[in-house]
Amino acid sequence: MATETDRTAVQAILARAAEEGRSALTAPEGRAVCEAYGIPTPQERLASSAEEAVAQARELGLPVVLKIVSPDILHKTEAGGVLVGLGSEQEVADGYATILANAKAYDASARITGVQVQQMLTSGQEVIIGAVTDPSFGKIVAFGLGGVLVEVLKDVTFRLAPTSTDEARSMVDGIAAAEILNGVRGSEAVDKPALAGIVHRLSRLVTDFPQLAEVDLNPVLATGNGATAVDVRILVDPAAAAEPVRFGQDEILAAMNRIMKPAAVAVIGASAEDGKIGNSVMKNLVNGGYAGEIYPINPKAAEILDRKAYPSIKDVPGDVDVAVFAIPAKFVPAALEEAGEKGVAGAILIPSGFGEIGNIELQNEVLAIARKHGVRILGPNIYGYYYTPENLSATFCTPYDVKGGVALSSQSGGIGMAILGFSRSAGMGVSAIVGVGNKADIDEDDLLTFFEHDDNTELVAMHLEDLKDGRAFAETAKRVSAKKPVVVLKAGRTSEGAKAAGSHTGALAGNDRVYDDILRQSGVIRAPGLNDLLEYARGVPKLPTPKGENVVIITGAGGSGVLLSDACVDNGLTLMRIPDDLDAAFREYIPPFGAAGNPVDITGGEPPSTYRNTIALGLSDDRIHSLVLGYWHTIVTPPMVFAELVVDVVEEFRRKGVHKPVVASLSGDVEVEQASEHLYAHGVVAYPYTTEKPVAVLGAKYRWARSAGLLS
């Protein structure tokens, strides 16, 4: 086994496969590739006759495994090309003949290189380690339980390649059944560093040789003092080495700053006729208070909305930063040529009729024109975009002018309008709302790069159906989320990719777990649904960043306390174990039939002072890092009395420099709705009729704080 990488050996093997037009390596070639990168494999030989197989088995030591070696038979087991546990020389000789016969029956035209005689390993925990070329993320590595279990449990985790050794170890520890690797019921604990080492070396291999489309090490047998890749399957595809077009950060920022903060906007297809998209865009720009120049482009009009119209964007006397296209798709290429010659930074393509209906050719033509002129395209097939600091509503939808720190984007127009409606209903201040549509060019990582440097944006929330360049997004999101929360709603949790996969790893990668793992590693807060995305966007910025993990529940209803406890567990929050002195302090304020501990149950019939005193205690004790309040509507402490006292005590401690997240669940009659609104308006994330939502928002804040390294 090589201890250093031997790239020359791998290059020679891949060159031979390419020369022969093969899309897969043989098993001996796969073993040689593994050996070149320090990945342990069993001892083996290649036999071309039964006599040779017997001699090699004698040399390796019985029992042995026999495997067919053929560039045309990838799935050896299905072809009857694998025999295990051959314990005598006669069994080896007979097995050789059986394997050849099975291979011919499976595929009479298959080229037979020989039969692999392999040392049989009789003990160890089976795991799978693999790599695959994901359509969005490129090279990713996988780790999970192997053998039969991989098909049944699909207990596997993924990372971008290459991985560091620490990331590789996090994979080994990150599967649901990780405890099995620690040894259960007297079984031996496996050598986790050895497994992590294989993951790390495999990730380097596929990074160094991106034409390796899929690599399957399944099973890998792990023991207490090492790990060995028993079976190796490697698929080769030159297309797997293709890299997407990427722009540098400075290039992205230069274009996005002109797009989001334009000094001049042209509307191509501007109209004076109500009901036309070009008219709606003009009205939103003019009536929305945008202070820059607005140039209507329409060869049949002299004036639109009291502004001089121009036959072509080339006739505009000054510079133009952004051109909003409100013309049919077939006219876009010619108009974009003119916009490119004018030197616009951004083309906002509202029209549909491109890739979303299968017209890829037209979309590619438009993109080629944009690339030629250095124009960035937003869209096509979008509602436009909003950037409130500039009073910019470059859209045909309803305007929005409530300014704040939340930037939102959506791949779907309908979801975009849901975002708009929620924002208006909730009074959520936004910095931007952006439609990305088909993402012919500008996508989420371009937006993230802008919002990262935008002082008007505190949190970014994104709805997406796919990622054009998932690797660029993950790298950008990791950088951004260290400074600002990034929330993502990924629609489409299943994939057709698994159907065409050529390996176990490929099949496993065809599911939502890839997105889940890589987004989590990038520090992204993943929202399970649309309402969650919007509530996280609204609530996470409201909450101070906690300083530690200790969460305490204070409730007036035992039933709510149980549900709130469940919600805390579901959202990865740690319920503090109350020390004796703090337990005694809480008992000073609650009735004898109440309950200290955690939750602290003050019971429902208590006056406002009990709520006030227990909440104040929770805020004053440095060992408590966050509070979850459960309120039960009573006449003794009416909803608005509760809301006002909570705000009063929280603001009192803020003035003292104590900033802790406080969320609240209110149960009761309709008056709890107004009380919840009052709390929310004053920085206490509160909801009526639910124990789950406030805790989910707190959990989202904690996930971000952990990933950003902000918890002590």
Image (tube, rainbow, N blue to C red):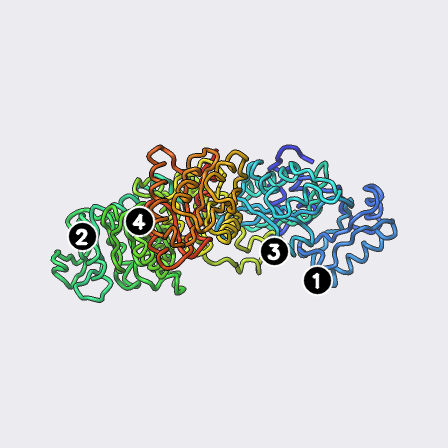
Give percent across and percent down for residue 404: 29, 46
How far, Cα to Cα, is label 4 from label 1?
63 Å
SS of the residue at dot 3?
A: loop
| Distance from the alpha carbon under mark 4 to that under mark 2 | 23 Å
The answer to which of marks 4 and 2 sits earlier in the sequence is 2
Give me the residue at 74% from left, 53% from top. 68
Residue at the disc numbered 4: 430
Q: Which residue in the structure is indicated by mark 1?
A: 107
- Marks 1/2: CA–CA distance: 69 Å
**Kind of residue indicated by mark 2:** Ile
Nearest the viewer among 430 and 545 is 545
Q: Is residue 699 above or below residue 348?
A: above
Mark 4 vs mark 2, foreground winner is 4
Residue that carries the numbered disc 2 in the rendered image: 294
| Residue in front for this viewpoint, 259 or 579 | 579
Question: Mark 1 or mark 2, which has the lower sequence index?
Answer: 1
Report x, y in % for residue 356: 39, 62
Q: Residues within 10 Å of mark 1 (few under 14, many from 20)?
A: few
Asked if the residue under mark 3 is in contact with the one under mark 4, i.e. CB atoms within 8 Å, the reply is no
How far across and down, in percent of the image, does residue 186 sit?
75, 42
Classify mark 1: helix, strand or loop: loop
Report if the CB atoms under discs 2 and 3 are less than 8 Å apart. Answer: no
In-image side of 362 versus 279 (left or right): right
Q: Earlier in the sequence, mark 2 or mark 3?
A: 2
Q: Nearer the viewer, mark 2 or mark 3?
A: 2
